Amino acid sequence: MSFKAEYIWIDGTEPTAKLRSKTKVLTDGGQPGTWGFDGSSTNQAEGHASDRVLVPVFTCPDPIRGGDDILVLCEVENVDGTPHASNTRAVLRPIAEQFAAQEAIFGIEQEYTFFKGYRPLGFPEAGFPAPQGGYYCGVGADEVFGREVVELHLDRCLAAGLAICGINAEVMPGQWEFQIGPVDGLTASDHLWVARYLLYRTAEEFGISATLDAKPVKGDWNGAGAHTNFSTKAMREGYDAIITACESLGADQDKVLEHVGQYGHGIEERLTGLHETAPWNVYSYGVSDRGASVRIPWQVEVDKKGYIEDRRPNANVDPYVVTRLLINTCCSALEK
Ligand code: ADP
Ligand code: MN
Ligand code: MN
Ligand code: MN
Ligand code: MN
């Protein structure tokens, strides 16, 4: 019996990469090996030298096709075996390795917005729905839109074995969140990309699209973020390390801009200082403060150990980038 392997990779689209996938039929007992694709159709090559290489890095059951079928997340390489310029996972690998002894783990809260045509799901044909207030964690057909998609997506993430740990309806109609973690940076990122793939594919079956746009509706509507919760072994054991990590992220303005500059396209539009955000260019941290760049959860202050939440990353952030930046900045400071 043959089976289907869905090869998934991240393309070179600027300013925000997209997911691509194609199917390879394998014969019984076959292993998903390296494969090629036309990089000139994905912003990853010029037409005259278009071949790029897919190198499998993470495989799991395909919960959509079922049976023996699998999903195969890949890194993109050039034909000479070097990582392609768009391959941010390859940049994370050596940093994760360098600081492995600190046992960094992550929980990423992925917010996203469903669209039906050109309108967010739940928005009327013309005008706007009732202002924000009742939608967050809402119940009932007048409060939440798209739950059947969300439930199916959750079931599929679980069936694929992803480290998904929760879901909730968000502040704007049609906006939702799922959380991946807490697991190491590479695993959290791999699982988040596959969960995004499953989200797009699942919504597709309902004629709905899901977007990671950080500010899908301008004006007095919440944006979409990817709050990134982070801890090292030392942070899970004591409060000094929590403060060291918070301080390191605001060490100087160059450090602040290094992070927010790579926290996803359109960060200035979302991090305005309104709608539970801090201004993008002013770093702050605080206990329980949803208006700070970095929040120390109240329980963490009580226990004097735990984790911190970097609230700045946009929904459209590349998890390989945000986990690398947090490991590099915080673990360097904690090593001293
Ligand atoms: P909130 O919406 O209140 O900000 P969520 O419950 O949506 O919080 O998300 C909390 C996240 O924190 C989860 O993804 C979870 O995996 C993560 N998390 C919990 N403990 C740790 C820890 N020690 N280190 C890193 N992440 C953690
Ligand atoms: Mn062809
Ligand atoms: Mn959350
Ligand atoms: Mn949220
Ligand atoms: Mn959060």
Image: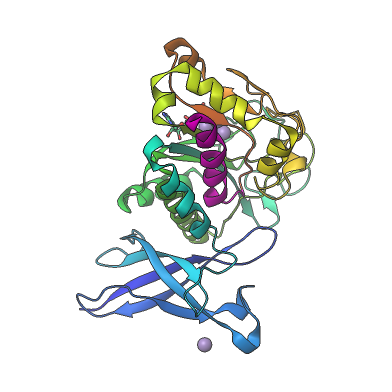
Q: Nearer the viewer, residue 33 or 314?
A: 33
- Percent across and percent down for residue 271 are 73, 35
Q: Is residue 144 left or right of residue 236?
A: right
Colour mapping:
rainbow
Question: In the displayed image of the protein, which residue is found farthest to the front?
Answer: 336
- Given residues 136 and 270, the one toward you in this image is 270
- On screen, residue 144 above or below 69: above
Percent from the top left, x then y, of residue 221?
Answer: 72, 35
Tell whether position 76 is magenta: no
Confirm whether residue 278 shows in the render: yes
Q: Quadrant of residue 312?
A: top right
Residue at x-position 68% and y-position 37%: 255
* In the image, residue 152 above or below residue 207: above
Instruction: Residue 323: say if magenta.
Output: yes
Task: Tell me residue 333's x, y (percent).
Answer: 54, 31
Tell me where residue 117 appears, x and y as whole percent.
67, 58
Say which residue appears at 61% left-offset and 25% top-offset: 247
Query: Is 102 on the left or on the right of 120, as rendered?
Result: left
In magenta, the rendered stretch is: 316-336
Q: Quadrant of residue 105?
A: top left
- Total residue callouts: 0
Q: Residue at x 80, y 38 (%)?
A: 219
- Residue shown at 57% from the left, 49% from the top: 321
Task: Tell me the quarter of the image containing the N terminus.
Answer: bottom left
Whether residue 139 is visible, yes or no, is no
* Above or below: residue 289 compared with residue 128: above
Residue 132 drawn above or below residue 239: below
Give the prevailing secondary structure in the magenta stretch.
helix
In-front residue for pair 38/305: 305
